[in-house]
Image: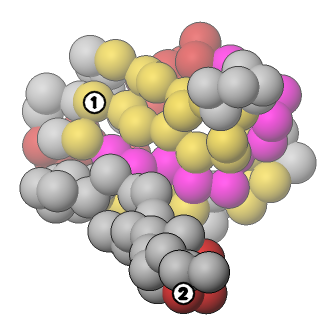
Amino acid sequence: MNIYVGNLSYDVTEEDLKQAFEAFGQVESAKIIVDMYSNRSKGFGFVEMSNNSEAESAIHGLNGKEFKGRTLNVNEARPRSEGRRGGTGGRRGGGRQGGRRNSY
């Protein structure tokens, strides 16, 4: 099961995250999401656990608990929806004219 972990302290490392979840079972991976420009934590991450009952125990055991000064938000991760990449939402054009060129 893939588990979302939100409201992480910016000081939390992937090893810290892994150790917190290992109290509930075997952790396959722990990943903290970082900003691609600053390389700073975005304050959330994901933990992968292969045993669903251990993952459920981790969710119930850690959700709402304090971890390194922050109250965690822990739940089952939702699958990424296809086509969601952010950006401008498909808007095209140049400003207020909606892409039209002025003909002077």
Which type of secondary structure does the marked residue at label 2 adopt?
A: helix
Q: Which mark is residue 97?
A: 2
Q: Is residue 90 left or right of residue 95?
A: left
Q: Pinpoint residue 44: horizontal percent, then vertical percent.
A: 58, 45
Q: What secondary structure prevails in the magenta region?
A: loop
The extreme right residue here reads 69
Q: Pinpoint residue 27: horizontal percent, then vertical percent.
A: 32, 20
Q: Is residue 79 left or right of residue 19?
A: left
Which residue is located at x 17 percent, y 41 percent? 1
State the separation of the CA atoms marked 2 and 1: 48 Å
Q: Pinpoint residue 84: horizontal percent, then vertical percent.
A: 26, 58
Asked if the stretch drawn in magenta spans residue 10, the answer is yes
Query: As displayed, is residue 102 above or below residue 60?
Result: below
Say which residue label 1 marks: 48
State which region is magenta: 3-13
Which residue is located at x 13 percent, y 27 percent? 50
Q: Pinpoint residue 91: horizontal percent, then vertical percent.
A: 39, 73
Q: Amino acid at mark 1?
A: Glu
- Locate residue 33: give its quadrant: top right
Which residue is located at x 43 percent, y 22 percent? 30
